[in-house]
Amino acid sequence: MTIDIPAEIETYRIVFDGGSLGNPGRGYGSFAIKGPGQYAATEKLNYDHLGNRVTNNEAEYLTLIGALEWLANDLGERAKHSRVSVLGDSQLVISQLKGAWKVRKEELKPLHNRASTLLGRFGRFDLTWQPRAESVKVLGH
């Protein structure tokens, strides 16, 4: 049996940010994905369908989930042979997904589980907190 292993693992970078007008309030978010060659995607999201009850932390998780779903679906089977590098200014989301902080809020547990499952679809992943100014440079907000 021969296993086809790429010589160099494809790496994709996700920068994400979410927020809420009012906290809780109307949720929104955006993400940018960069990859090999000219691979690039950006998306602005709103969570109006959830009403005026979205917290900042929920919007952060929802936006990361949206980015991971987008990339995993776009790559298909290649996702499991790819690396995703996630950068965000939410210390809570990054620290919880790394396992450094516990997920205490019940409403965040399913979001944490979904994000963790999606990260598992990639061959490798890393999570990095970055200052808000760095996210703003990429996302514009």
Image (cartoon, rainbow, N blue to C red):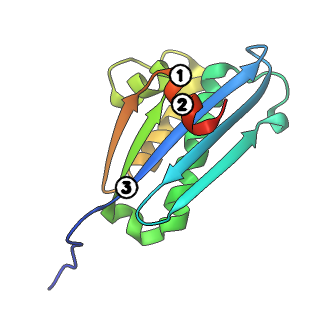
Pointer 2 with pointer 1, Cβ within 8 A: yes
Spatial CA distance of label 3 from label 2 is 23 Å
Pointer 3 with pointer 2, Cβ within 8 A: no
Q: Which numbered disc covers residue 132?
A: 1
Mark in front: 1 vs 3: 1
Sequence-wise, the earlier of marks 3 and 2 is 3
Question: 123 left or right of 31?
Answer: left
Q: What element carries label 2?
A: helix
Near-viewer residue (78 or 8): 8
Amino acid on which the number 3 mark rests in the picture:
Phe
In what quadrant of the picture does the N terminus appear? bottom left
State whether residue 111 appears in this view.
yes
Amino acid on which the number 1 mark rests in the picture:
Arg
Q: Is mark 1 on a helix, strand or loop?
A: helix
Spatial CA distance of label 2 from label 1 is 5 Å
Residue beneath disc 3: 122
Residue 22 coordinates in the image, percent (x, y): 79, 13
Residue 86 coordinates in the image, percent (x, y): 42, 40
Sequence-wise, the earlier of marks 1 and 3 is 3
How busy is the neighbourhood of tag 1: few (under 14 within 10 Å), some, or many (20 plus)? Answer: few
Q: Please name the residue shown 54% across and 63% down the image.
A: 73
Q: Is mark 3 on a helix, strand or loop?
A: loop
Q: Please name the residue shown 73% across and 22% down the image.
A: 20
Residue 79 coordinates in the image, percent (x, y): 40, 63
State whether residue 89 appears in this view.
no
Amino acid on which the number 2 mark rests in the picture:
Ser
Q: Please name the residue shown 59% across and 56% down the image.
A: 41
Residue beneath disc 2: 135
Pointer 1 with pointer 3, Cβ within 8 A: no
Residue 113 coordinates in the image, percent (x, y): 48, 37
Label total for image: 3
